[in-house]
Image: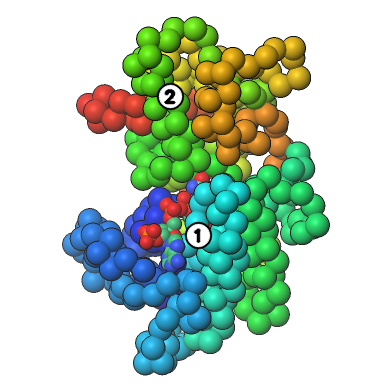
């Protein structure tokens, strides 16, 4: 098949493009940064490089800024349009940019797909369009609900936009939870979500060492609350199967049925970062944060909504999609978590052990 892909130069896209090419598909790759796109192409096995066409464009521009020649060259040539490009940041001050990239960018993507006559549109959203609710369903959420940040809201708005096209194209929405490294190697090309969190802790630990500070420091969160981590290979494999098996007008949660607790995640991070004085302060208990703890918590405050609760996600549609495929329903063991965290703090060690 001929596939159009946005976001290929990103963490998930880099993994997905490989899968799609290995399945024998041709890929038109949208990139705003040609240097990055060429690097990505050069890193692919030589035998696959010939099946990649790089197109320069930006999702925030109408028709991606494509010329009429490019648009007519693509017309009726694309079988599936995968839309992954987005801004993955949770900061409130980035609200306008998040809306422009994630909401208007998706509108533009739908416009291009329609203009060039694409029959099937696969949209990558996030499980966290669930907002402040603790029950994740495989349906569109009400836009009137509360969201934790403008990222969630921009992605929820985009989902509604996608579903407006359901009579014009075969549309489906895939919602991964927190994407982490490869389940076998831990490899991850990401600075956001868990990686932004680990980086924040790493910097803070160094700061404390410089100041010779050895008191216990607490993060605010729920010890038994869970963080819904999903390995990037699992997400990319599901999206690859989606090319053939996604059902139209369907929403798929790509979530972890047995997510690790924050205690387990933080314990693993503590061990590999050798940050022995780090602990969790259970929200609601009588404890006053020290000035150092206030600094720590404000440094990583964008992650707070994800550390103080447990959300149960339905993923019946995803399980149905996986039936009869070689991909098993996710069973993320503690060993996989170890591999992922270790690969971040001690990448050399993981490579040697592999
Ligand atoms: N990472 C997660 O934990 C996570 C969880 C759930 C859902 N998701 C969703 O999965 C998708 C991929 O996320 P990711 O983690 O792979 O993100 P990422 O590593 O930040 O990659 C984002 C991609 O989007 C491209 N992009 C951004 N703005 C663009 C623009 N204006 N025009 C064209 N391309 C643009 C980036 O291009 P450049 O290389 O030029 O920057 C990059 O290829 C997103 O839709 C995200 O919402 C991610």
Of label 2 and label 1, which has the lower sequence position? 1
* 253 in relation to 240, above or below: above
Q: What x and y, as percent, mark residue 144?
A: 80, 57
Which residue position is annotated with label 1? 86
Left or right of residue 308: residue 59: left
Q: What x and y, as percent, mark residue 253?
A: 64, 50
Left or right of residue 108: residue 308: right
Residue pictured at 39% horizontal, 55% vertical? 10
Element type where label 1 sits in the image:
loop
Element type where label 2 sits in the image:
helix
Which residue position is annotated with label 2? 204
Q: Which of the pair 250/84 is nearer the observer?
A: 84
Q: What x and y, as percent, mark residue 319?
A: 63, 48
Q: Are marks 2 and 1 in contact (CB under 8 Å)?
A: no
Q: Quadrant of residue 139?
A: bottom right
Q: What x and y, as percent, mark residue 186?
A: 37, 35
Q: Which of the pair 13/101 is nearer the observer?
A: 101
Determine whether the beta carbon of the residue marked 1 sits less than 8 angstroms from the nearest atom of ligand 1: yes
Q: Quadrant of residue 289?
A: top right
Q: Quadrant of the C terminus?
A: top left
* 241 in relation to 305, above or below: below
Spatial CA span between label 2 and label 1: 28 Å
Residue pictured at 56% horizontal, 59% vertical? 98
């Amino acid at each position: 098949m001929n596939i159009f892909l946005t976001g290929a130069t990103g963490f998930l896209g880099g993994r997905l493009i490989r899968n799609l090419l290995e399945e024998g598909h041709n890929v038109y790759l949208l990139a705003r940064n040609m240097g990055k796109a060429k690097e990505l192409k050069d890193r692919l096995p030589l035998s696959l490089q010939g099946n990649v066409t790089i197109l320069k464009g930006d999702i925030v521009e109408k028709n991606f800024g494509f010329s009429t020649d490019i648009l007519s060259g693509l017309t009726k040539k694309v079988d599936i349009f995968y839309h992954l490009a987005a801004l993955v940041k949770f900061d409130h001050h980035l609200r306008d940019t998040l809306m422009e990239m994630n909401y208007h960018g998706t509108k533009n993507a739908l416009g291009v797909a329609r203009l060039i006559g694409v029959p099937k549109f696969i949209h990558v959203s996030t499980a966290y369009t669930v907002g402040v609710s603790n029950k994740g369903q495989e349906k569109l959420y009400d836009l009137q609900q509360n969201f934790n940040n403008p990222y969630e809201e921009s992605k929820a708005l985009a989902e509604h936009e996608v579903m407006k096209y359901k009579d014009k194209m075969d549309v489906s929405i895939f919602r991964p939870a927190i994407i982490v490294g490869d389940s076998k190697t831990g490899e991850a090309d990401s600075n956001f979500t868990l990686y932004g969190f680990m980086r924040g802790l790493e910097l803070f630990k160094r700061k404390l060492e410089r100041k010779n500070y050895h008191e216990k420091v607490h993060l605010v969160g729920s010890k038994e609350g869970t963080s819904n981590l999903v390995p990037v290979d699992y997400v990319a494999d599901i999206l690859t199967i989606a090319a053939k098996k996604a059902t139209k007008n369907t929403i798929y949660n790509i979530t972890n049925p047995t997510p690790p607790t924050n205690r387990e995640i933080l314990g693993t991070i503590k061990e590999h970062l050798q940050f022995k004085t780090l602990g969790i302060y259970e929200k609601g208990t009588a404890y006053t944060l020290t000035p150092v703890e206030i600094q720590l918590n404000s440094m990583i405050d964008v992650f707070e909504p994800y550390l103080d609760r447990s959300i149960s996600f339905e993923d019946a549609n995803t399980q149905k999609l996986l039936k009869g495929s070689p991909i098993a329903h996710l069973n993320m063991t503690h060993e996989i978590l170890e591999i992922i965290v270790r690969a971040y703090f001690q990448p050399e060690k993981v490579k040697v052990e592999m």
